[in-house]
Image (tube, grey):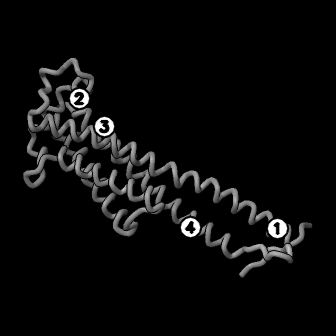
Amino acid sequence: MESCSLISIKAITGIFVMRREWGTMKRILPIAVGIFALAGFADSLYLSFAYFGLVNLHATQGVVACAIGGAGCEAVMRSEQATVVGIPSAVLGAAYFAGILGLVVARIVADKWPFPLLLAPLLLVGLSFSGYLLNTIATDMDEPCRLCLIAHAINVAACTTIFVSLYIDGVASRLGAALAQHRRPGAQGRWRST
């Protein structure tokens, strides 16, 4: 039978290992979100340029992005759902992804997500809007815009990663608090709980 102090040492050792793994995830996940946000921003910016006629989808069929987009991009951009309150959905998407990119920079600099209580509802609004647009594409369009589908998939990936990161930030802070409760006194050599 193990003594109580040996069990405590094993528990504290496990917390140190978990804290190290969570710490790695705390650094990697915001970078992943930044990559998703940058890709979503580029995709939405391209669709914004196409909406305003700065990119001719027919004249550039040899360009990879247009070949991926297919004929559905033009149909989606000419639909009445292409704008929300007069603002093109692609422009809203570019602004949305730029906002996420700004949040990622703030997260990396401050080592915590800014406004975590507001972040989750805002992301849910973004996911809901993506769901609405995906439903519209699926039900009202003959051929979907592949670039739009990519933007929505990136949104889901970015939001999911942010939610996981928020969870890990909470778990990591709780592990840090647990470690703070178990300190090793200098001369006594025993673990104690405060």
Q: Which amino acid does label 3 sit on?
A: Ile
Q: Can residue 125 be seen in this view?
A: yes
Q: Along the polypeptide, which appears first: circle 4 or circle 3?
A: 3
Q: Which of 156 and 140 is in front in this view?
A: 156
Please give left or right for residue 165 compared with residue 20 in the image.
left
Which of labels 2 and 4 is toward the front? 4
Please give left or right for residue 35 compared with residue 82 in the image.
right
Q: Along the polypeptide, which appears first: circle 2 or circle 1?
A: 1
Label 1, secondary structure: give it.
helix
The tag on residue 69 is 2
Q: How far apart are marks 4 and 3 (CA)?
A: 34 Å
Q: Which of 161 and 146 is in front in this view?
A: 161
Q: Along the polypeptide, which appears first: circle 2 or circle 4?
A: 2
Location of mark 4 (residue): 173
Q: Along the polypeptide, which appears first: circle 3 or circle 1?
A: 1
Label 2, secondary structure: give it.
helix
Q: Nearer the viewer, residue 131 or 21?
A: 21
Please give left or right for residue 56 compared with residue 111 in the image.
left
The residue drawn where x is 42% and y is 51% is 160
Please determine whether, in this image, residue 176 is positioned above or below residue 162.
Answer: below
Location of mark 3 (residue): 150
User: Residue 20, position in %: x, y?
Assistant: 64, 55
Q: Along the polypeptide, which appears first: circle 2 or circle 3?
A: 2
Q: How far apart are marks 2 and 4 (CA)?
A: 43 Å
Marks 2,4: beta carbons within 8 A = no
Marks 4,3: beta carbons within 8 A = no
Location of mark 1 (residue): 7
User: Residue 194, position in %: x, y?
Assistant: 71, 82
